[in-house]
Image (cartoon, rainbow, N blue to C red):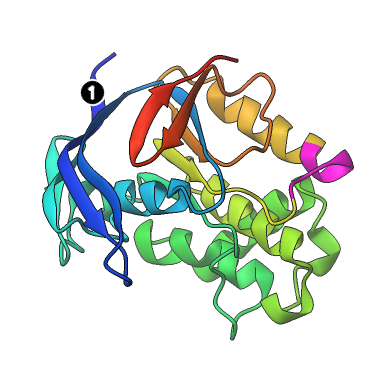
Amino acid sequence: MAELLRLEGVTLRNQEDRVVFEGLDWSLAVGDRVRVDGVAGAGTTTLLRLCAGLAHPQAGRVILGGQPLGPYTFDHPFLKRGGIGWVPTEGGLLVNLTLRANVALPLRFLRGQPQSRAEEIAQEQLERLGLGLQAERRPHALEPRDRWLGALARAAVMAPELWMLDHPPGGLEGEGQRRAVALLQEAAGNMTTTILTAGSQAWPGIVNEEIHLEQGRLVPGGL
């Protein structure tokens, strides 16, 4: 498959000036299904943020879809068309909107869907994830895991080319995990869909490659 994402000589320091990555080279091909794991503080979330254009290196380049990501590239074509399905641990939902409106938001503003149709699609995804009865709630009224599932629904409505899933708070289990896995397995049925996850959450039937983040280096693992 063609290359989708590439990190070239990436060096990044955190706010305490600690080096998280130094001269990191790595690539992700279209259709890859990768989980990046590491001990707490290793930088798995930071790696996802780099790849999503939400964090920017002090040196090196992040190239997505053949074009560099910069600190102010809001018009990057991959991002403008909603190519990334970003699911952060905290959910990243807007506090002043209902869960349904949050999920519908990218359909309205990136795909130009009318509000009524966008919210209809959003409701379908929420029901699929067991959140249909919570659609009118705002994020502060939801459990952390439900906020994460809401972010998963928000990503799903866009059928993204690249899914980026940070670890669910506390991990998923039971019915929540079953529903999330079913949704992601359907997405993975498209051979051109790429999935990058961070953390120790198991994604059976989805992830087929594991990488460990150790002292700023990506080390191949095994499943």
Which residue occupies 33% across, 71% down?
A: 16
Residue 109: x and y in percent read 38, 66
Magenta stretch holds residue 173: yes
Out of 186 and 198, give the one closest to the viewer: 198
SS at mark 1?
A: strand
Quarter in which the N terminus is drawn? top left
Residue furthest toward the right? 174
Out of 102 and 49, give the one closest to the viewer: 49
Out of 27 and 17, give the one closest to the viewer: 17
Residue 31: x and y in percent read 40, 21
Q: Up-down: is 37 above or below 73?
A: above
Residue 125: x and y in percent read 68, 50
Quarter in which the C terminus is drawn? top right
Which residue occupies 62% across, 52% down?
A: 153
Which residue occupies 26% across, 27% down?
A: 27
Residue annotated with mark 1: 3
Residue 89: x and y in percent read 59, 58
Horizontally, residue 116 falls left or right of residue 24, namely right
Out of 106 and 57, give the one closest to the viewer: 57
> Badge 1, how many Cα within 10 Å: few under 14, some, many 20+?
some
Which residue occupies 64% across, 26% down?
A: 185
Which three-letter amino acid code belongs to the residue tagged 1?
Glu
Magenta stretch holds residue 110: no
Image quadrant where residue 103 sits: bottom right
Report the label total: 1
Horizontally, residue 7 falls left or right of residue 159, namely left
Q: What segment is highlighted magenta in the picture?
A: 171-177
Image quadrant where residue 132 sits: bottom right
